[in-house]
Amino acid sequence: MRFTSVLAAGTAAVLALGLTACGSGDGGGDGGGGTDDVTITMLPKNLGNPYFEASTAGAQEAADELGATVEEVGPDAASPDAQVPFINTAAQQGVGALVVSANDPTAIGDALEEARSAGTKVVTFDSDTEPQFRDLFVNQASPEGIADKQLELVADQIGGEGEIAILSASANATNQNAWIALMEEKLASDYPDIELVEIVYGDDDDQTSFDKTAALLQSHPDLKGIVSPTTVGIAAAARYVSTSDAKGRVAVTGLGTPNQMREYVEDGTVEAFALWNPTDLGYLATQAAAALASGDIAGEEGDTFDAGRLGEFTVGADGEVLLGDPYVYDETNIGDFDF
Amino acid sequence: MRNVLRRREAGIALALLVVIGVTTAVQPGFLLSAGGWRDLLLTPAILVVLAVGQAVVVITRNVDLSVGSVLGLTAYLTGRLFLAAPDLPILVVALVAVAAGALLGLINGAIVAFARVPALVITLGTLYVYRGVTLTWAGSDRIDAGDMPRTFLGLGTRQVLGVPVLTIVGAVVLLAVAYYLHTSRGGRQLYATGSDPDAAALQGLPVRRRLLGAFALGGALAGLAGVMFAARYGTVSSGAGLGMELQVVGAVVVGGVAIFGGSGTVAGAALGAMLLLTINRALPVVGIPDFWQRAVVGVLIIGAIALDRVLANRRSRRLAAARDTDPPATTPPGDAPPGTGPDDREEATA
């Protein structure tokens, strides 16, 4: 998945969330029936990746609340079959559940099937396998959710009317194109006063995105907002706007990571941007894994389970659980994140 | 005066003025707004520095394809230095990066000069090696704007009397290198080496030393460009400068530096860099769709090479005609010290 690989390019630093501290307070007692002895293995794409450190912190938080134990294992590099030995080991240990972000949709399929036949429940998060290899997939965001949230942000920031442009990744990036198509539909139906004047492609390259931003501002003097549904693009656009006379006049929003955007949120170039919250994602995946392992749910469509502070979730078609709308980062909360 | 107008550089400068003029007519803000004026001068600054370095290498009948990777490595180094020691003076960081670039260039030069393998192949190899080092070092890590001092990032956009600092850096580099190439003995020897390596060796010119110097200078300037890149873009990932070598070679060729060495000026290369990037910025403003822009740049490069070829043919015909009518006195084949002659000659043909 192109987008997560971009995400994975986060800066190094261990997550120190305020949330983790709050969570442990009311844990202990209310773990519910049979979850006390559940052991869960957390298998991210690779270790040492700030994005997954954030999701593991969420997993730890959920485990503390449930009285379960979580162990994180994983390869150093995110190559397709590097996760196989870790899956085999977890199956031999007889862990209750395996929470995995798949490096490849099929390469780890056999290993997962073997683990499941040994009684281990498998939950994928962030990056899915083929549906037959896992019990549940905890999806970080739906394309509709991502498209809607970005439009909501930009409409809010430009006062509901005016010209906007989109700065995308490469012209053939599947995710971005799907989101842009949804945004175009939604613009036509729900935002009649906002005009999308141009879509440009920065190729997920800082320099190209930066120069394209300059060109956008040149060629559309009345531009009021730039939406960049890619972490590289939004940072480059924000950097250009922050040092130009368009600062304060042209809104920049889209999908970004807190570390990349901190500078521009603090200096006022960017009001707010969106992305899912990897801590919540790890938290929800662990809650789902514990519910499966303790037999509270079977993973069928329509099953519901309680996910602690995030509330109740329902399993959708193809065993998918949707985390919800993307999380909005702004001046008030960006200091709480470090990935 | 006529001589000045007939120079290759004048043609490129004219093309540049036409591009600026037409685009400004379509969208006055392209030149006449504060942001437009700044971008016009600022955007080409990094490529100008790279192109000056590349021109020196190409003049010796070599090419350095690794400059994009050197830029990436030194830009990342710049960020890491600031992370490790936030109080380090900017000048010290810049000097370290330039020295690192010079070292990387020297490695290229040493392999080309001593192993006698074509520079195209060697630097294609080091392009991957240097990029690999950056990838290993950086991994999925990245330098963000917040990791570098504000004063340093400020240099990326600050202006002195309406001229951006980075542009001033580019202009100083251009003037210094142009002066060296035009007036010093070493500079002239670079041209001699490139125009006929065998003859240069037979003349007893220190061909090998000149090659090392040219590559080291090219590397040092790529290191400087890395520092400028970090200041300008504020974000350095392991992919910084990816593919830039082609832009640089394009700029040099468009600027009239013959790819077979021996002729051209760094001023031409700098103008070529400005022309390429200004066209890049002008095309969207005049309404040419994103996807066509690269094609237009490609046509420009091919056109420049074709023009080069035509001019070279015409010149050699004219020289041949001049020779037939007025044969010059033959000079003895040089006063090379007997020991070094053959050695240098072989290397020069590499």
Image: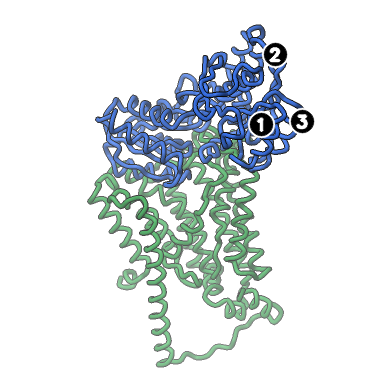
Chain colours: A blue, B green
Q: Residues within 10 Å of mark 2 (few under 14, many from 20)?
A: some
Task: Give the letter of the chain under mark 2.
Answer: A
The mark closer to the camera, 1 or 2, is: 2
Quadrant where the N terminus of chain B lies?
bottom left
Quadrant where the C terminus of chain B lies?
bottom right
Pick out the residue farthest to the top: A29
Q: Which residue does the numbered mark 3 point to in the structure image?
A: A92
Q: Which residue does the numbered mark 2 point to in the structure image?
A: A36
**Which of pointers 1 and 2 lies earlier in the amino acid sequence?**
2
Q: Which residue does the numbered mark 1 point to in the structure image?
A: A43
Q: For residue B79, which numbered disc appears in the image?
A: none
**Which of pointers 1 and 3 lies earlier in the amino acid sequence?**
1
Name which residue type carries label 1.
Leu
**Label 1 SS:** strand
Rendered position, B97 above or below A159? below
Percent x, y of residue B307: 38, 72
Q: Identify the residue at image location x=42%, y=43%.
A: A210
Task: Give the letter of the chain under mark 3.
Answer: A
Rendered position, B318 above or below B190? below
